[in-house]
Image (cartoon, coloured by chain):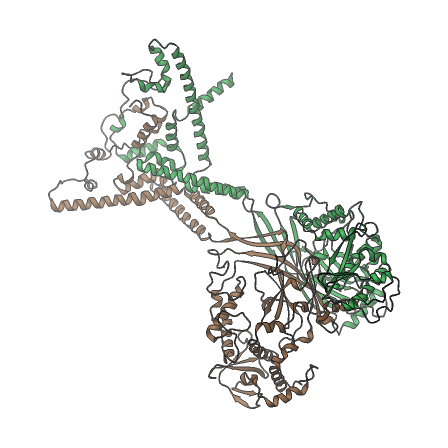
């Protein structure tokens, strides 16, 4: 019962809006609203009224438009960037060091013996020295050769190129008397190409090269990959350069360190690589001072004499600075350090911190990328390079059904080799050339939200100097090999200084350009600027709308009622309407103007209970009061206070 | 009247309530009062309704402070409107590979060009011998020792005569030893130490220099150098340019290296490439240069993988035997990474490559965009810079400066400098046609360096540019063990081009690649838009006074239109009165209220009522009853309070 009563009360409250017609309501609203324009529409003369009406309309539309602009700006999720630079104690970067040659030639000789002999034979055929067939009697292993032979394409007659297997006649053993092709044909007329076949040599393509150097290098690399992929990983590690042979001296700031401070990792391109300060097991080392004195100083021996001759033609150490717990992609971002020199590297850390969704497409740990990160086996963090490489390996396994040696091996897969997968070279070269494959991978992989780059300033000097050469080599040889003979030379030693520059960090940080506070203050600013309005004005407006609806409902109800009555009237069409009926019908407004009723009609205001003391309205006595204006006014204020 | 809508009733009431307003107000004071009471702006009302002088004063102060603050803040906002905010974006994407221009440091094969330079070489050697006692015939074996000696007897030296090299003592007495004739000679003119403005070299020993004179030899300038190495190189280059300027372009191209010769092998993105992928670009000082990925024959190549194996790998043949000993003293190649439509300023910004080394250059791309007018003084395409671009390349600041200098050179000296392209209808300078161009050039160059030509003021930077940050590292190549097989096979590759076996020091390996595909764009964007400015205005106006544009219109209406109309009316009345008094002196007199005789209209009801009793007095008796309280009113009537000023007009 209470509830009903309460509801009825509410209904009455609501009904007791400011007016009973639309016009009344509007005028009341204009007069009492806090928004600045509408009041003027009411209280000015007709010309000004029109002007103010237009102005108000214009401003309202301006406000709406600007609001639209701001809301759209907000929803575009822009970021603003702040850049800070300076020096602070930072973790020293992880330093990865590799030798340019992956293996010691003395240890892999037995594996590469057949291949090297083939290579030498090919060189002989191309270069055609005078004593060409002096040692042609040695037995070559043609099983390797026949998988992917090198051919010479004679293009001296462009209409009819002749394809010549470089070792073909030696192979057959018959045409040993024919002259070496390299003698008759030079690089201008002939090109060396690699023949790649599949389906047992029935479908073949030639991979062309413009120079024989490239062709031989690529061919050797392919064959070597083939051989090494069949060797178990631990044996490969044994064949690479051991840490104690590579790293001769190490000093971090004032503290000595040695090869045991380096974490070993096997890199397919460069063999054993050693990472200093990787931060996997222990805490990363901080560096609190700028300058070479407080950095990492290393002396390496790359042992150039023991390089695999055909595999790498460049001699030096490979070096990469990278963040802790990240995988070193040394082939992409690494730099060389030359032997016989001291290379000083000043480091500036460049950090990039992105905002994630919805501001940009980046990933925090790679879990939302549809590519399985193969490098996570190393327990490293996500990076886009890792993603792209994993993606390539995935495609490789899909297309060629074996994994490439240069990329990590997924569980349950096997590395490609000619014995088990005879078509893999053909398949791999196709995949490499495919642009679509790379595009797919780039589109699939997202960049990571936190990115650290190390900017380097590199400078070089000769080391050791001629004066100090003797004793330095002596000491280093003594330490490493415990021999009094000098086992080192200028072609092998590399000195490295890695240190922070005077300003060691630059952080580029993204933050939301437009937040909700920004949006509200701008919306408020616009509304206030044009119309002096606030949220309360909006509520006022909403209230008026409710009143509007309410009036409409009342009117509709009245209209429906009148319709029903008219229908009821229609039944007694004949007799004239009685007074009572007329009274009833007064709610129908359409009825009134037809008949001008003389005299005061008691039913004129049927629903106004308030009016009705009949007679003249009370006189405006105030107008008679004799008072000066000021006094009246201050009085009224006094009342008000 | 019964059918009158309630809305109209309200309006009628409001009309009644509102006191005199607008131009109808009798005095400005009335108008102000009305404004203060009815304005939407806060503060004004307080001034009028406050009681007490102190409080009113305070409110006046507050209001004025608020107005001042608004003006100040809005001025700050306007002043900061044309500022930019910089945003840095890094994104990973497929990148266009830049154009790479590679030059041998030595411009022309010495064996071919020697015929042209034979005289100059002889004289240089004579100068070296006389000045420093350098024995001529030991350094280069292929030179016949006596051939030039005999030639020397017959012909008079022309280069040394034209621009004599001199050695002089440091007493600066105006005595110089012309080493050609051996006698001392006086010189009149200024001594200009090269770069003496910037660095004060303490000169203690003998210095070497050369004298440049204008046409009539009355104006001479002497250029001295602290070291003979610089003096002789500068002197040699001067004459060298003279000679080369007379050689037609086709001949010069033929004298220089061909692409097949320079590039032994080439590999891009794992695919072989050759000389056909390179376009020729002839540089006056570097001879034939070759540009990779120049868009001329095909579309721009792009990289979709970072790392050295996916970039450009070339092996260059430098052929150190063919180097010009006086023009270049270093050996190697120069490489420059630039945009496809950019002119490679190889002499200004090239990276040098050492022979017998593998140089690996890792690139990072940074793109910068600036906002042009009104935010900064940069130019989009150089069309609004009053310097015509003599290069066939996109605008850059450097192009503008060089073009400006060349144009000035043609204007002042009548011929164009050899280092830069020819402007239309101009020739390169040489002795035959322009005997005193060198003096003119040196004078002009000094003026240019001192920014007296106005080039630096006129030229503006370009709004957008791409920059490749290079990380260069070196390694030994070929390694000791691979040298044995690599050199012969490279010789075979080079084929018929050369007859000899390749040497390690004739070769250089170059790797250019993107380290990763992160592109960094630095973009300027307007810090403020017009919407922001307006909303900030709105915020300020609202914060201090709750004012809006409506209020501003109000102020304009009241303070300017209405006030002026009132003042005008008063003046008109006065004028009318004065006129009336002049023509009809006897008028109504004896009025004591001075406020009223200004206004000569018919007395209004108010004024009529106010007239007879003194203000403040009341009609005696009981106050009129408050009938209003008795009235049965409708909901709206509470608008009408009984204390409103009755304003019948």
Please identify the quarter of the rendering in which residue A514 is found: top right
The spot of residue A448 in percent (x, y) is 66, 48
Q: Is residue B141 above or below residue B72?
A: below
Q: Position of residue B519 (x, y in %)?
A: 62, 54
Q: Position of residue B73 (x, y in %)?
A: 44, 49
Residue B24 vs B126, above or below: the answer is above
Residue at 69% across, 45% down: A366
Residue B467 or B420: which is nearer the viewer?
B420
- Which x, y percent locates residue A485? 85, 70
Quadrant position of residue B647: top left
Query: Which quadrant holds the N terminus of chain B?
Result: top left
Q: Closer to the camera, A500 or A578?
A: A578
Near-viewer residue (A319 or A269): A269
Give the side of residue A297 with respect to residue B641, left or right: right
Q: Colour of chain B?
A: brown
Pick the quarter of the image with the C terminus of chain B: top left
Q: Is residue B490 left or right of residue B79?
A: right
From this view, report whether residue B350 is shown above or below residue B547: below
**Chain for colour green:** A
């Amino acid at each position: 019962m209470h509830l009903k009563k309460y509801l009825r009360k509410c209904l009455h409250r609501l009904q007791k809006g400011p007016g009973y017609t639309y016009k009344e309501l509007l005028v009341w609203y204009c007069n009492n609203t806090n928004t600045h324009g509408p009041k003027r529409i009411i209280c000015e003369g007709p010309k000004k009224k029109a002007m103010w009406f237009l102005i108000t309309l214009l401003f309202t539309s301006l406000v709406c438009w600007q609001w639209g602009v701001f809301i759209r700006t907000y929803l575009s999720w822009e970021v603003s960037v702040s850049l800070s630079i300076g020096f602070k104690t930072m973790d020293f970067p992880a330093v990865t060091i590799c030798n340019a040659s992956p293996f010691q030639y003395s240890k892999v000789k037995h594996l590469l013996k057949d291949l090297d002999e083939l290579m030498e034979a090919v060189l002989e055929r191309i270069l055609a020295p005078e004593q060409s067939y002096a040692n042609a009697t040695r037995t070559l292993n043609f099983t390797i050769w026949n998988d992917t032979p090198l051919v010479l394409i004679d293009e001296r007659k462009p209409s009819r190129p002749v394809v010549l297997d470089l070792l073909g006649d030696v192979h057959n053993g018959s045409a040993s008397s024919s002259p070496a092709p390299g003698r008759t044909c030079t690089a201008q007329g002939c090109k060396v190409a690699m023949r790649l076949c599949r389906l047992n040599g029935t479908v073949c393509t030639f991979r062309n090269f413009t120079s024989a150097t490239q062709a031989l290098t690529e061919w050797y690399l392919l064959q070597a990959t083939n051989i090494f992929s069949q060797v178990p990983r631990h044996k490969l590690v044994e064949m690479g350069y051991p840490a104690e042979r590579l790293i001769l001296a190490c000093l971090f700031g004032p503290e000595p360190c040695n090869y045991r401070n380096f974490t070993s990792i096997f890199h397919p391109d460069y063999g054993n690589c050693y990472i200093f300060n990787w931060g996997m097991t222990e805490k990363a080392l901080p560096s609190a001072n700028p300058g070479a004195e407080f950095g990492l100083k290393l002396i390496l021996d790359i042992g150039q004499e023991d390089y695999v001759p055909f595999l790498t033609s460049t001699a030096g150490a490979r070096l990469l600075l990278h963040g802790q717990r990240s995988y070193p992609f040394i082939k992409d971002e690494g730099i060389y350090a030359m032997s016989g020199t001291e290379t000083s590297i000043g480091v500036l850390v460049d950090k990039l911190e992105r905002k994630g969704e919805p501001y940009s497409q980046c990933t925090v740990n790679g879990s939302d990328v549809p590519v399985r990160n193969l490098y996570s086996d190393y327990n490293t963090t996500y990076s886009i390079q890792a993603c792209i490489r994993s993606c390539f390996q995935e495609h490789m396994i899909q297309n060629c059904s074996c994994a490439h040696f240069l990329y990590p091996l997924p569980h349950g897969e096997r590395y490609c080799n000619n014995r088990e997968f005879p078509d893999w070279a053909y398949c791999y070269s196709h995949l490499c050339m495919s642009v679509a494959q790379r595009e797919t991978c780039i589109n699939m992989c997202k960049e990571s939200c936190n990115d650290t780059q190390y900017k380097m300033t590199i400078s070089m000097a000769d080391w050791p100097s001629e004066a100090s050469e003797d004793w330095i080599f002596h000491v280093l040889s003594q330490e490493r090999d415990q021999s009094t003979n000098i086992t080192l030379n200028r072609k092998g030693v590399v000195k490295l200084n890695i240190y922070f520059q005077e300003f060691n960090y630059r952080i580029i940080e993204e933050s939301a350009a437009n937040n909700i506070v920004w949006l509200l203050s701008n919306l408020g600013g616009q509304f206030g600027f044009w119309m002096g309005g606030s949220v309360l004005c909006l509520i006022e407006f909403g209230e008026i709308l409710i009143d509007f609806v309410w009036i409409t409902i009342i009117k509709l109800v009245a209209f429906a009622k009148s319709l029903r009555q008219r229908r009821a009237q229609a039944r007694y069409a004949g007799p004239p309407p009685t007074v009572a009926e007329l009274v009833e019908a007064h709610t129908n407004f359409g009825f009134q103007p037809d008949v001008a009723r003389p005299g005061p009609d008691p039913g004129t205001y049927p629903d106004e209970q308030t009016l009705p003391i009949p007679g003249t309205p009370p006189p405006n006595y105030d107008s008679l009061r004799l008072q000066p204006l000021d006094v009246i006014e201050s009085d009224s204020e006094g009342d008000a206070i | 009247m019964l059918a009158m809508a309630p809305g109209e009733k309200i309006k009628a009431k409001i009309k009644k309530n509102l006191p005199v307003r607008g131009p109808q107000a009798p005095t400005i004071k009335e108008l102000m009062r009305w404004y203060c009471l009815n304005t939407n702006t806060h503060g004004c009302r307080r001034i009028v309704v406050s009681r007490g002088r102190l409080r009113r004063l305070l409110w006046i102060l507050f209001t004025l402070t608020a107005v001042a603050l608004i003006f100040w803040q809005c001025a700050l906002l306007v002043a900061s409107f044309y500022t930019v905010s910089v945003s840095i974006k890094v994104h990973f994407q497929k990148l266009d590979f830049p154009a790479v221009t590679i030059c041998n440091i030595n411009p022309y094969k010495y064996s071919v060009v020697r015929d042209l330079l034979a005289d100059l070489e002889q004289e240089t050697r004579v100068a070296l011998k006389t000045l420093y006692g350098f024995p001529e015939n030991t350094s280069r074996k292929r030179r016949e020792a006596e051939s030039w000696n005999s030639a020397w007897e017959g012909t008079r030296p022309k280069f040394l005569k034209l621009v004599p090299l001199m050695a002089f003592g440091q007493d600066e007495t105006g005595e110089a030893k012309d080493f050609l004739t051996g006698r001392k000679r006086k010189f009149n003119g200024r001594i200009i130490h090269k770069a003496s403005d910037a660095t004060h070299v303490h000169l203690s020993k003998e210095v070497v220099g050369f004298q440049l004179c204008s046409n009539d030899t009355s104006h001479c300038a002497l250029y001295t150098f602290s070291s003979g190495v610089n003096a002789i190189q500068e002197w040699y280059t001067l004459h060298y340019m003279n000679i080369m300027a007379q050689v037609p372009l086709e001949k010069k191209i033929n004298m220089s290296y061909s692409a097949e010769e320079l590039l032994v092998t080439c590999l891009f993105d794992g695919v072989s490439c050759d000389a056909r992928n390179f376009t020729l670009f002839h540089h006056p000082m570097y001879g034939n240069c070759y540009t990779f990925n120049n868009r001329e024959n095909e579309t721009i190549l792009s990289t979709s993988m970072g790392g050295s194996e996916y970039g450009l790998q070339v092996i260059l043949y430098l052929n150190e035997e063919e180097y010009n000993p006086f023009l270049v003293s270093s050996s190697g190649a120069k490489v420059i990474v630039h945009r496809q439509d950019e002119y490679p300023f190889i002499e200004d910004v090239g990276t040098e490559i050492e022979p017998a080394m593998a140089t690996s250059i890792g690139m990072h791309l940074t793109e910068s965009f600036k906002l042009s007018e009104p935010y900064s003084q940069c130019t989009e395409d150089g069309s609004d810079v009053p310097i015509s671009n003599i290069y066939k390349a996109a605008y850059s600041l450097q192009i503008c400066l060089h073009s400006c200098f060349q144009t000035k050179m043609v204007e002042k000296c009548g011929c164009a400098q050899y280092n830069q392209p020819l402007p239309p209808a101009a020739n390169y300078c040489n002795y035959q046609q322009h005997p005193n161009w060198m003096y003119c050039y040196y004078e002009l160059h000094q003026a240019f360096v001192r920014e007296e030509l106005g080039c630096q003021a006129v030229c503006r930077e370009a709004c957008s540019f791409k920059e490749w940050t290079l990380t260069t590292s070196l390694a030994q190549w070929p390694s000791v063990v691979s040298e044995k097989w690599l050199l012969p096979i490279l010789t075979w590759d080079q084929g018929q081009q050369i007859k000899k076996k390749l040497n390690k020091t004739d070769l250089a390996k170059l790797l250019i690649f993107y380290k990763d595909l992160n592109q960094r764009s630095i973009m300027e964007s307007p810090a403020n838009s017009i919407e922001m400015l307006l909303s900030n205005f709105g915020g300020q106006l609202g914060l201090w006074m709750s004012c809006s544009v409506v209020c501003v219109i109000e102020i304009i209406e009241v303070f300017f239109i209405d006030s002026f109309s009132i003042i005008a009316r008063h003046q008109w009345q006065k004028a009318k009165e004065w006129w009336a008094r002049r023509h009809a002196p006897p008028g109504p007199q004896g009025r004591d209220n001075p406020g009223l005789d200004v206004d000569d209209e018919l007395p209004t009801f108010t004024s009529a009522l106010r007239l007879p009793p003194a203000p403040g007095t009341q009609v005696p008796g009981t106050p009129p009853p408050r009938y209003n309280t008795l009235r049965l009113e409708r909901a709206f009537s509470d608008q009408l309070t009984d204390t409103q000023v009755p304003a019948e007009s």
